[in-house]
Image (cartoon, rainbow, N blue to C red):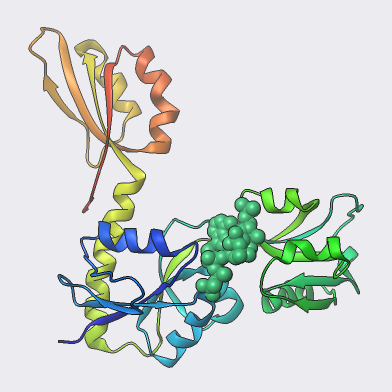
Amino acid sequence: MKRLRVAVQKSGRLNEDSLRLLKDAGISIDNGKEQLKAASGNFPLEVLYLRNGDIPQYLRDGVVDVAIIGENVLVEKGKDIIIAEKLAFSKCRVSLAVPKSARYNGIEDFQGKKIATSYPNTVTEFLTKNGISADLHIINGSVEIAPNIGLADAICDIVSSGSTLFKNNLKEVEVMLQSEAVLAVSPLISSERKEILSKLQFRIQSVLRARKSKYILMNVPNSKIDDVVKLLPGMRSPTVLPLAEEGWSSLHTVISEERFWEVIDELKENGAEGILVASIEKMVL
Ligand SMILES: Nc1ncnc2c1ncn2[C@@H]1O[C@H](COP(=O)(O)OP(=O)(O)OP(=O)(O)O)[C@@H](O)[C@H]1O
Ligand SMILES: O=P(O)(O)OC[C@H]1O[C@H](OP(=O)(O)OP(=O)(O)O)[C@H](O)[C@@H]1O
Ligand SMILES: [Mg+2]
C-alpha cells in the first residue's frame, strides 16, 4: 500500500510541535533516533526528517507529498507551493530592523543601504514594491549581529518575542510578513496519496479545533439561565441539566478559550458558580 510521504524538520523549532500534531492526530511514528525516515504503524504515512530550507525543493520535485514547514520559507522559496492548512504554531514575523540609535523616517531610509538577511527574495520583493533598491548581504544565521560588527546597516530576519533584536540593540521598523507553521502540498501529489492526505487533514482539523476550544461546566440559578445562555454560544446550544438542589442547573458548553476569558466576569455577575474548564482532545463537527 502507498504511504503519504510527510516532510518534518529534522531538528529545530518545528520538529517537536510537528511530531506532537501527528501524535495528537492519532498517528504513531516509530521514532528510532538518528533515523531519517520512519513509518507509522497505524496510518499509511511515513515521515522524512529534512532541513526546513530544503523542503520547498523536495515538494516541487515530488520527492515528498506534504510537509510541515514555516510559511515564511514558502514565501521565500516556494511561492508555487499550495498551503493546505495553517497549523497555528511557530508564529513569527519577518521584519526589517535597524540599530536602536538610528533615526527612522520610513522605508525610503533603506535606499542604497546594506541589509543582512537569510531571506533575500522576500526582502527584495518588499523593497522593490516600495521603489527601494538596497544592497543585500546574504547570511544563513546570527543575522542580528551584522550591524554590530559593521557588516550591514540593517537586517531582515524572523522576529517572535523581539528579545534577539533587543539583545543586539536593534529595533523592528517594518513587518514584511506574518508566518506560522503550515501543511504544504507538492504539486505532483498522486490522486491515491491525495486521498490519504484528506484523511490526514480531517484529523488535523479536529485536533486544531479542539486546541482552540474548551469544554466548560457551571452551576447557574434557574432564573439566570437565559442570560447566561446568551453569553455562551455552544456548538449548537448549551446543555442544561437540573441539579439535585432545587432552583439550580448545571450548564455545559464548548467555547473558544479567548471567548471564555471575555465573558468570565459576566458569567459570575449572572450568578454562575463552580465553573470548570476542561481541555478537549478532538472535535469533529
Ligand atoms: N523565534 C521564533 N519563534 C517562532 N517561530 C520561529 C522562530 N524562529 C523560527 N521560527 C519558525 O520556525 C522555522 C524553523 O526555524 P529554525 O530556526 O528551527 O530552522 P532553520 O534554521 O531556519 O532551518 P533548517 O531546518 O533548514 O536548519 C522558521 O522557518 C520559522 O517559520
Ligand atoms: O524574537 P525572538 O523571540 O528573539 O526570536 C527571533 C530569533 O529566533 C530565530 O533564531 P533561532 O533561535 O531559531 O536561531 P538560529 O538563528 O540558529 O536559527 C530567528 O532567526 C531570530 O534570531
Ligand atoms: Mg532559526
From where the camera sits, is residue 177 visible? no
From where the camera sits, is residue 32 visible? yes
Please state the horizontal and vertical placement of residue 50, each as a whole percent of the image: 44, 78
Residue 201 vs 174, above or below: the answer is: below
Q: Quadrant of residue 99?
A: bottom right
- Tell me the quarter of the image containing the N terminus: bottom left
Residue at position x 50%, y 87% in the image:
57
Please state the horizontal and vertical placement of residue 161, each as a whole percent of the image: 62, 48
Residue at position x 90%, y 71% in the image:
111
Furthest-left residue in this view: 244
Residue at position x 78%, y 52% in the image:
171
Q: Work out whether residue 136 or residue 239 is closer to the camera in this orientation and state it.
A: 136
Q: Quadrant of residue 253?
A: top left
Q: Work out whether residue 81 or residue 98 is closer to the camera in this orientation and state it.
A: 98
Please state the horizontal and vertical placement of residue 283, each as a whole percent of the image: 23, 50
Q: Quadrant of residue 145?
A: bottom right
Furthest-top residue in this view: 246
- Is 10 left, or right, of 154 in this rendering? left
Q: How many marks?
A: 0
- Is 115 left, or right, of 260 in this rendering? right
Residue 132 vs 272, above or below: the answer is: below
Please state the horizontal and vertical placement of residue 160, each as a whole percent of the image: 61, 53
Q: Work out whether residue 171 or residue 16 is closer to the camera in this orientation and state it.
A: 16
Ligand 3 image position (quadrant): bottom right
Residue at position x 40%, y 19% in the image:
266
